[in-house]
Image: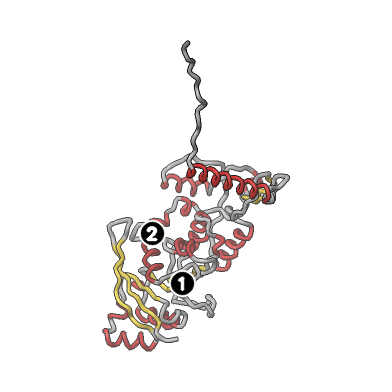
Amino acid sequence: MALSSTSLPKTVVISVPVLVLSAAGAAIFLFFLLSSLSSPPPPCICSTSPATVTTTTGGFSGDTNFQSYKRERISATVDDIEWVKSQIEANGLHMADNVLRKGINPRTRQQQLQDLLQFKGISHYEGEEAKNHTALPCPGELLVEEHHSNYGEPWAGGRDVFEFLAESAHLTPYSRVLEIGCGTLRVGLHFIRYLNPEHFHCLERDELSLMAAFRYELPSQGLLHKRPQIVKGQDMDFSKFDSGVMYDLIYASAVFLHMPDSLVWVGLEMLAGRLKPIDGRIFVSHNIKFCSRLGGEECTKRLTKLGLEYLGKYMHDSLLFNHYEIWYGFRRTTA
């Protein structure tokens, strides 16, 4: 009689290390589960209704149902326009009346100027609507940027001058700057954009340059809100500027070349007390013949009498074109 074989049940063997690890994992999972259940839910920071924002752009005011945001105004305000008018009036500037007309076709700058002069301006409105919101029609010579060619160097070179002067004088937006003869703001625009409002001052005698600054450059660059103090004057008359202002930088780019030496010294005497001691800088471009013509020793004596010290000659290379400028630096040594 054959014996039947009987199968024995299989035995699963679990080692002690595996058992310990499994228990530890279960304990960790249980800890985090209990922690999450016991923690209060985060507070709700959502609004139950969309935010309502009132925006004002270009004179238009309206409500929008977009997420709340804050941004600076872009277009000129009523105060900006009134400021331009007051500056033109205060400086005694004038320009011919322009009778606006309906549109013109695109043309070269010279053709545009001829058209603007012939038809006295440009307008896309008729009748009473032809009176624009500023009541300050812009002269055609400015619209075609003729004033950008009134320099011996490219208009773009103004950026080079700004970079050199701002870095050499270690300026910050809180600094105060005075330019003697800012012209049509070839350099000044960059200072105005960089500095805080009202911190850029300029003395300029040419009326067309002043009109270009107020009526074209500042509005076109969106810088009316910076309120630069640009004053019509000549013969180094700084009486219209606040006597309490101390400047971090005073500069004259190719201006002293066209003045009698005696007038330059008068200006330096007036400005020496307006320059911050030690850290303030005066920079003059091209040459200082008003000083060198006296001889080194005599020039040093005059500067010392004014409390000024000659710092030396600086050369600045242009990034934009094959050109460099020469500048001469001075500082105030006495408080």
Residue name at image x 32 percent, y 78 percent:
311
Residue sitting farthest toward the right: 48
Secondary element at tag 1: strand
Residue name at image x 65 percent, y 48 percent:
34
- The x and y percentages for residue 82 are 62, 61
Residue sitting farthest toward the front: 1
Local packing at callout 2 (Cα closer than 10 Å; few below 14, some 14-19, many 20+) is: few
Quadrant hosting residue 156:
bottom left
Q: Is residue 289 visible?
A: yes
55 and 318: which one is in front? Answer: 55
- The x and y percentages for residue 205 are 46, 69
64 and 251: which one is in front? Answer: 64
Judge whether 319 appears above or below 106 on screen: below
Could you say which disc has been placed on residue 150 in the image? 2
- The residue type indicated by label 2 comes to Asn
Residue name at image x 47 percent, y 10 percent:
1
Judge whether 77 appears above or below 6 on screen: below
Q: Circle 1 sits on which residue?
A: 178
136 and 317: which one is in front? Answer: 317
User: Which callout, 1 or 2, points to the residue nearer the camera?
Assistant: 1
- The x and y percentages for residue 109 are 42, 47
- The residue type indicated by label 1 comes to Leu
Residue name at image x 54 percent, y 66 percent:
197
Sequence order check, earlier mark of 1 and 2: 2
